[in-house]
Image (cartoon, helix red, strand yellow):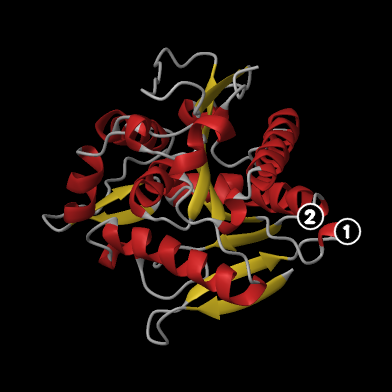
């Protein structure tokens, strides 16, 4: 692992580069991981590290990223007033990985709100060749309401009643203080993968009743997994989020996608729309 601060010197972002191993040491295959935020960032940190290690062993360059105001990156999350900051962080990570490995295109793997951000970046970034949306946040208001419910349930566990120090400019949810501007923006956020032109893998819980579709046949593959819905389980908030079976499935699927992209030389073609039908043919099989 190679930790490095990237981006603007006044608002540096922590990145962790897991270099491609084995016969693919000079691989054209690259992934940027877009993590969740808040408490979910903490829960999933260990699993995303293991996920990155497994991909690297498959010959993939992997970059893990802390957004501005989160983890070990510069800034405070309560000063972030728009997800546009994090969208730019992902674009910075893509460019950094390209500059340091020689890859021309990158696959985005996003988890929870990170998946929703990844979808937005993929929608207008020609350097993204595919996207994995892992248990994505499809409705921002439902997402925040579930977090708030957990927050209030946690407060009720205290022996002495306590109040969250919210005000007109900030709201605290599960130990993270968000600006009201950011909260309002997330509440308005929805996920529509149908506008993404790149091949996409969507990983959903079996308990998630939503269905996604795409106007282009074969471009979208959906996996439903039997993992438990720990996001809404207060007892699991302080426990590491581990998904070994699902992680292996996603690693194998990403490896297969890279094989397909490589076969049609799409890893070195930022705009591979002409070959999209051939590339995605049989993806549902």
Name the one closer to the observer, 75 or 205.
205
Q: Position of residue 40 (x, y in %)?
A: 50, 44
Vertical comparison of 130 with 137: above or below = below
Residue at point 24%, 54% (across, down): 165
Q: 22 or 38: nearer the eye?
A: 22
Say which of 243 and 281 sits in front.
281
Look at mark 1 in the image and give the residue it sits on: 23
Residue in front for this viewpoint, 212 or 207? 212
Alpha-carbon span between mark 2 and mark 1:
7 Å
Indicate the position of residue 247 as horizontal and vertical percent values. Answer: 70, 36
> At which x and y percent is residue 187?
22, 39
Residue 54 appears left or right of 263: right
Q: Which mark is residue 59?
A: 2
At 35% across and 30% down in the image, what residue appears? 194
Disc 1, SS: helix
Q: Is residue 132 above or below residue 225?
A: below
Q: Relative to residue 251, is residue 160 drawn left or right?
A: left
Give the number of marks.
2
Q: Quadrant of residue 179?
A: bottom left
Q: Mark 1 packing: few (<14 Cα in 10 Å), some, or many (20+)?
A: few
């Amino acid at each position: 692992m190679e930790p490095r601060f990237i981006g603007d010197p006044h608002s540096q972002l922590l990145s962790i580069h897991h270099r491609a191993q084995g016969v693919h040491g000079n691989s054209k295959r690259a992934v940027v991981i877009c993590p969740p935020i808040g408490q979910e960032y903490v829960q999933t940190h260990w699993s995303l590290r293991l996920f990155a290690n497994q991909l690297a062993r498959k010959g993939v360059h992997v970059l893990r990223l802390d957004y501005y105001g989160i983890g070990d990156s510069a800034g405070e999350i309560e000063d972030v007033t728009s997800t546009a900051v994090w969208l730019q962080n992902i674009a910075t990570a893509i460019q950094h990985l390209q500059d340091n490995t020689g890859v021309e295109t990158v696959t985005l793997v996003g988890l929870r709100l990170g998946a929703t951000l990844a979808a937005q970046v993929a929608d207008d970034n020609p350097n993204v060749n595919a996207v994995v949306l892992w248990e994505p946040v499809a409705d921002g208001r439902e997402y925040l309401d579930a977090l708030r419910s957990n927050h209030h349930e946690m407060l009720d566990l205290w022996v002495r009643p306590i109040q969250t120090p919210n005000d007109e400019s900030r709201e605290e949810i599960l130990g993270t203080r968000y600006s009201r501007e950011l909260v309002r923006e997330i509440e308005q956020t929805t996920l529509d993968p149908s506008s993404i032109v790149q091949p996409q893998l969507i990983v959903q819980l079996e308990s998630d009743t939503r269905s996604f579709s795409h106007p282009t046949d074969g471009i979208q593959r959906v996996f439903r997994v039997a993992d438990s819905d720990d996001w809404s389980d207060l007892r699991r908030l302080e426990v590491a989020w581990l998904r070994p079976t699902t992680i292996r499935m996603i690693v194998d699927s990403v490896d297969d996608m890279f094989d397909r992209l490589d076969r049609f030389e799409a890893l070195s073609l930022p705009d591979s729309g002409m070959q999209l039908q051939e590339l995605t043919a049989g993806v549902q099989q």
